[in-house]
Amino acid sequence: MKKLEEKTINTEKIYNGKVVKLQVDEVTLPNGKTSAREIIKHPGAVAIIPITKDNKIVFVEQYRKPLEKTLVEIPAGKLEAGEKPEVTAVRELEEETGYTTSNLTYVTSFYTSPGFADELMYIYMTDQLEALQENVTGDDDEFVELLELTLDEAKIYVKDQRIHDAKTNYAIMYLETLEMMK
Amino acid sequence: MKKLEEKTINTEKIYNGKVVKLQVDEVTLPNGKTSAREIIKHPGAVAIIPITKDNKIVFVEQYRKPLEKTLVEIPAGKLEAGEKPEVTAVRELEEETGYTTSNLTYVTSFYTSPGFADELMYIYMTDQLEALQENVTGDDDEFVELLELTLDEAKIYVKDQRIHDAKTNYAIMYLETLEMMK
């Protein structure tokens, strides 16, 4: 679809942070005019849907500073440079929940907000959880509370908007479709 | 969950753009230490799943500069200040597809990327489309191509990652659950 393409004339780098970078691209539009695109560069993220032996979903409750409130989410974290998403999935599972797994199923991937950010989110699932013998320490500025909920309980959390983010809402609906196919 | 809260010590405003704002908050963590949070402020967005009389889904193909490629998405756009999401939904439908509606069903809402952004995405659906007699002009820097696909065709687009963003992947799975309940 070449005719929709926007060609970069100039890139102004505004900010280079620990998590995000911000740049403004001056572009040529398909009609020949110019415009500016504000772009957030993000390393990408990986989430995992952990299902326990008694068919509960493991969630983490976490304070989200951009929203000034806590959300209940499936475990997730940023991709490290050069890391395979499967490795990130297991690492975040271990750090945030105290479980590990050697059995991952790929569920989907999607760009979270393609209008202004390049963040790509991968989602995996496992129903083969093993408790870790020793805690694995993760980011020292991350504080989470664990919750294990049935799918019916999780659907109430969605309704109450305590679960209220793209990857977790997607995960709940995905588990619903699996239930419906049984 | 007060014990997870992060208190703001200082806010450094980095960038104030047309679409996003970037600030870095210095915070006190639950353990008393301090950290920095990079935060993108976004006005929020609204998407609509438009279903035609012959049961096709109306999509727009659009160049996404952050990804340097086109994606096929359900119509969507940013909330204007003070605007109700239902109004945004109809406005974006009119501007991007040439259809209008007076019948909206609320589907869901979610934060697209709560780790670094406050963008809240609302999703609506309509199967009551009417063709507009005259084109409604939208943003003069937006160029889109229309596509009407059956659900089965759309699922192939998801598999091929031509459909590959949070709101649209969610919409396709939502329509699948509706089909399964028939």
Image (cartoon, coloured by chain):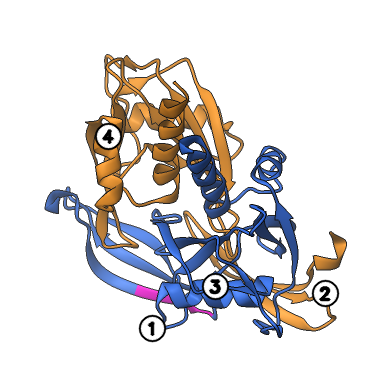
Chain colours: A blue, B orange
Labels 1, 3: one chain:
yes
Residue B152's mark? Answer: 4
Mark yes or no: residue B12 visible: no
Kindly report the distance in space between the C-alpha atoms of the residues bearing marks 2 and 4: 48 Å
At a point 28% along the width and 53% down the height, the residue shown is: B161
Task: Tell me the element at label 2.
Answer: loop
Residue indicated by mark 3: A101
Could you classify mark 1 by the number of other residues whose Cα lies within 10 Å: few (under 14), some (14-19), or many (20 or more)? few
Q: Is residue B31 left or right of residue A37?
A: right
Q: Chain of mark 3?
A: A
Q: Are marks 4 and 3 in contact (CB under 8 Å)?
A: no
Residue indicated by mark 1: A82
Could you classify mark 4 by the number of other residues whose Cα lies within 10 Å: few (under 14), some (14-19), or many (20 or more)? few
Q: Nearer the viewer, mark 1 or mark 2?
A: 1
Kindly report the distance in space between the C-alpha atoms of the residues bearing marks 4 and 3: 34 Å
Mark yes or no: residue B175 visible: yes
Amino acid under label 1? Gly
Labels 2, 4: one chain:
yes
Q: Is residue B73 left or right of residue A131?
A: left
Kindly report the distance in space between the C-alpha atoms of the residues bearing marks 4 and 1: 35 Å
At a point 64% along the width and 77% down the height, the residue shown is: A95
Q: Chain of mark 1?
A: A
> Which stretch did the figure color magenta?
A12-17
Displayed quadrant of residue B179: top left
